[in-house]
Image (cartoon, coloured by chain):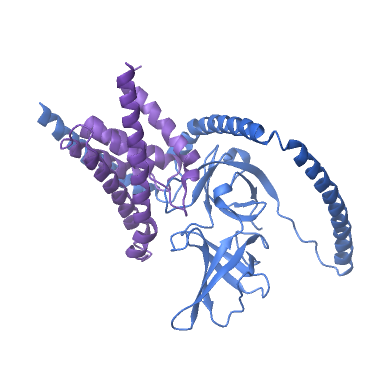
Chain colours: A purple, B blue
Amino acid sequence: MNNTIKIIIGLFIFAIINTIYIRYFSIMGIMPNISAIVVVFIGLNMGMEKGAYYGLYLGLLNDLLIGISLGLSALIYMYIGYISGALAKKMYNENIFISTLAVMLADIFYNVIIYCTHYLPKEYEFIKYCMRILLPEAIYTLGLFLIINALMILIRRQMNRGF
Amino acid sequence: MYKNKKSHTGKYIVGVTIILIITIVITAEKANFATNITSYITTPVYGLFNGINSLIGGSFNYIVRIGTLEVDNERLLKENEKLKYDNFILNEFKEENKELRNLMEMSERNLYSVVTGAEVVGVDSSSYSKIFIIDKGRNNGVNENMVVINYDGLVGKVIEVNDLSSKVMTIADEKIAVSCMLQRSKEQVILKGANLQDNGEVCKLDYITTDTDIIEGEDIVTSNISDIYPEGIPVGKVTNIQTDSSNLVRQVYVKPNVNFKRINDVLLIKNKE
């Protein structure tokens, strides 16, 4: 099967599984942003163009499944994919620092845009939003990313040894 | 060659951005054609995954509990006997209540009319909003603003209906407000979602002055003057009362009866007529 079709089907199944199982990850109402991790990962490994396209696709899926206004996460994830693709040019072989930075920035970027579009009209304080949502979510997402990354490196090494 | 390609991507990105911003403005807070079409594709997939999920979970549970099944069965049989007896007594009371109401020439209190039961298939993956998807839609008689409850109390209301699925906003979401009353004093209050406050997934009451008769642990039920919610559905308990520095207003936090983490089956009931 074509690689692109594989990724498209994979992302579709990921979006659905994400909404089914994400509630078991909730700590004090904070959920990790796994979609951002996936988009950053695609951007870092496949470059700006594909990062932007797949980000747009995953964001649209998220909007269609659970979002309130169509297109907002699509827009955010498209930029996340594009920017992490641009970052990838500076990345050497398995450089954990750049990818960690990209995931953290992606999550913060997402939540700042959400704050601007959802809560600015209601004058909800930004500091409070940072303490309650933005920082805990960024830390949680980062922790999850580091665990996934470590697992992937382990699997890759095992496979290299095996073949 | 590479540079040329890159500039093309930039153009596409600007174009897509403009199109998406227009879409966001048009579709803000409204059910739309696209989500309805998608629901036809996603609902079967949700069904498949939930089926697999319950199959795995069910057999896992069976293996774990196989040792205690006999003890459990004994306990449940005893409990069943007791419940049968309780039910009998309650039926007696119901009849008596009916007769007394007839004597007083009062109309019978309407019970909530259930439209359909539904299963929660997915939840919003973002930290800021508390929305979930249920597997019943317009084809099953669901309408917008319909009230969603489970056996613990009020869950929320339907905000978007597609043909096969719907989205429910829970009472912990910042964007929702429910007209409620205090069960002891029957005083009217407005309950708002406060999942963005510092103390976790709770709700709060708005406009509580210092002369309102309210205590910690008090029950809150839906109000009799609400347009959407039928009267008397249990909502939650007052957990924390903080007096403002000006001594005029109080911050009152409410813990909902429903545990939003463990929510699987819900009932949809008709709006008040």
* Residue at horizontal 57 percent and vertical 83 percent from the top: B211
Q: How many marks?
A: 0
Residue B15, x across and y down, in percent: 23, 40
Direction from residue B44 to residue B150 in the image, left or right: right
Residue B2, x across and y down, in percent: 12, 28
* Residue at horizontal 54 percent and vertical 81 percent from the top: B210
Residue A102 versus residue B10: which sits nearer the camera?
A102
Residue B11 visible? The answer is: no
Quadrant into which the N terminus of chain A falls:
top left
* Image quarter of residue A70: top left
Residue B1, x across and y down, in percent: 10, 26
* Residue at horizontal 61 percent and vertical 32 percent from the top: B60
Residue B148 versus residue A22: which sits nearer the camera?
A22
Residue B122, x across and y down, in percent: 51, 41
Residue A88 visible? The answer is: yes
Quadrant into which the C terminus of chain A falls:
top left
Direction from residue B13 to residue B206 in the image, left or right: right
* Image quarter of residue A96: top left
Direction from residue B35 to residue B119 in the image, left or right: right
